[in-house]
Amino acid sequence: MRRRILEFPEVRGVLSEHGRPEDGTDDEGPNMSETFVRLKPRDAWPRGVTKDTLQESMRASLTQIPGVAYNFSQPIKDNVEEAVSGVRGKIVLKIFGYDLEAMRATLVKASAALASVPGIVDLDLYRDATVPQLQVELDRTALARHGISVGTAEDVVETALEGKVATRMWIGERPVPVRLLLPLTEREDPTRIGEITVPAPGGVRVPLAALATIGVVSGRASINRESGSRFLALKFNVEGRDMGSVVKDAMAVVGRDVAPPAGDYFVWGGEFENQARAMARLAVIVPFSFVVVFALLYAALQSARSAAAVLLTAPFAMTGGVFALGICGIPLSVSAAVGFIALLGQVTLAALLVISAVETARRDGLAFGDALIAGASGRFRAVLMTASLAILGLMPMAVSQAVGSEIQRPFAVVIIGGLVTSIGVTLFALPVFYSLVARRSAVPAAIETPILETPA
């Protein structure tokens, strides 16, 4: 794996960690390996290579190694995913039950169904490893025939193979436990294990081979539990699509094509849980934001129709944010949704400048049509400078590829794209729409205080 990864010119170095650490902070087994890839600066990469294309090239190269399942992630992201769902993967499908073989067969069927969903990558069963295991299956009939209890036979097997503390010896002031067990060469051969004798009543010792079936079988490397129940997990990541739509399609496919065994049940988990909670909050915050903005517009314009005209044109001005996400290939995320809320404030501010100028022109005695033209043309420079300032200020975030740019870029791209379209909508579409909803009656001129002059 390291040799294949180092073949890429974008890679500076590779470090692998195998198994679990000695401090017990990770629960991985010896069959697990984490490979950290250090990349060169972006300006040293070949032209046209992006992080996504590099990851796809690495995946295509590594999957040629048989017997290995891969999961591409990042250190902090990896820890967050495991903290959220207990599984290293963006989206996790867990099945809870008792029969591990039936549960695994169900997840294999679900994996085949999910393979057809666009946007799903790194699809695989989580920790689905098996290891050779020595199995000693006691024959209760033979034990009863020799008058040996199950506990006695199990004690002999445990002492011989795993060991028991027989005594303690002191080294200086430190007690050291002394464990009694068979030598490693004796514990690796099933035939020699069968020659271990078990004490029977009357001082007779019976070979273990006469009391049990001994052999090496393939068994699960680990049995995972959650909430007191066994579970197996199917994990996958999402690329090229927004996570919400992928999860929706995945749930629909599994619900239609896969049914868990009787008594078992599915549970979906992963990062989409955080996204679902955030979107639920935004479903409340966004309408509340519109109400607050409408109230502020009404207070500034003293007209419900004028405030409604500004809010009704805001969605058209914000369409640039949608187009910008599509052009940049960025899926809708919580960061992008927050960007739309910030864009609403920018668009409303620009529209307020134009409408206030129109109302001022009407108070000065201009006709309704002339006031619309005068207001839009008079605020052209102010609207253009306001949008340009925000665009130039957010441009470094939009083009950044540094650490954390995955969160910053959608926010900046939405606002920049929305401000580009808001200039045209605010200066051209808003006056037209305002002419349809606003009252055409003359606006009373501002009352002027007369000045009394008296001759000296």
Image (tube, rainbow, N blue to C red):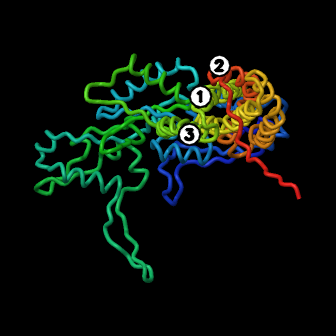
Check disc 1 and give the amino acid type. Answer: Arg
| Outermost residue to the right | 456
Check disc 3 and give the amino acid type. Answer: Ala
In depth, the one of 395 and 16 nearer the eye is 395
* Tag 1 secondary structure: helix
Report the number of numbered marks. 3
Regarding residue 416, the answer to whether it shows in the image is no
Among numbered discs 3 and 2, the one appearing first in the sequence: 3
Residue 62 in the image, given as x and y percentages of width and height: 65, 31
Q: Is residue 444 above or below residue 86?
A: above
Q: Is residue 113 above or below residue 409?
A: above
Q: Which mark is residue 305?
A: 1
Among numbered discs 1 and 3, the one appearing first in the sequence: 3
Task: Name the residue that disc number 3 marks.
Answer: 295
**Mark closer to the observer (1, 3):** 1
Marks 1 and 2: CB-CB under 8 Å? no
Question: Crowding near pointer 2: few (<14 within 10 Å), some, many (20+)?
Answer: few
* Tag 3 secondary structure: helix
Check disc 2 and give the amino acid type. Answer: Leu
Q: Is residue 165 above or below residue 143?
A: below
Marks 3 and 2: CB-CB under 8 Å? no
Residue at the image point whose x is 32% and y is 71% from the top: 167
Residue 366 in the image, given as x and y percentages of width and height: 78, 27
Question: Crowding near pointer 1: few (<14 within 10 Å), some, many (20+)?
Answer: some
Residue 424 in the image, given as x and y percentages of width and height: 76, 25
Residue at the image point whose x is 53% and y is 25% from the top: 245
Task: Name the residue that disc number 2 marks.
Answer: 436
Marks 1 and 3: CB-CB under 8 Å? no
Residue at the image point whose x is 67% and y is 28% from the top: 318
In depth, the one of 46 and 156 nearer the eye is 46
Question: Crowding near pointer 3: few (<14 within 10 Å), some, many (20+)?
Answer: some
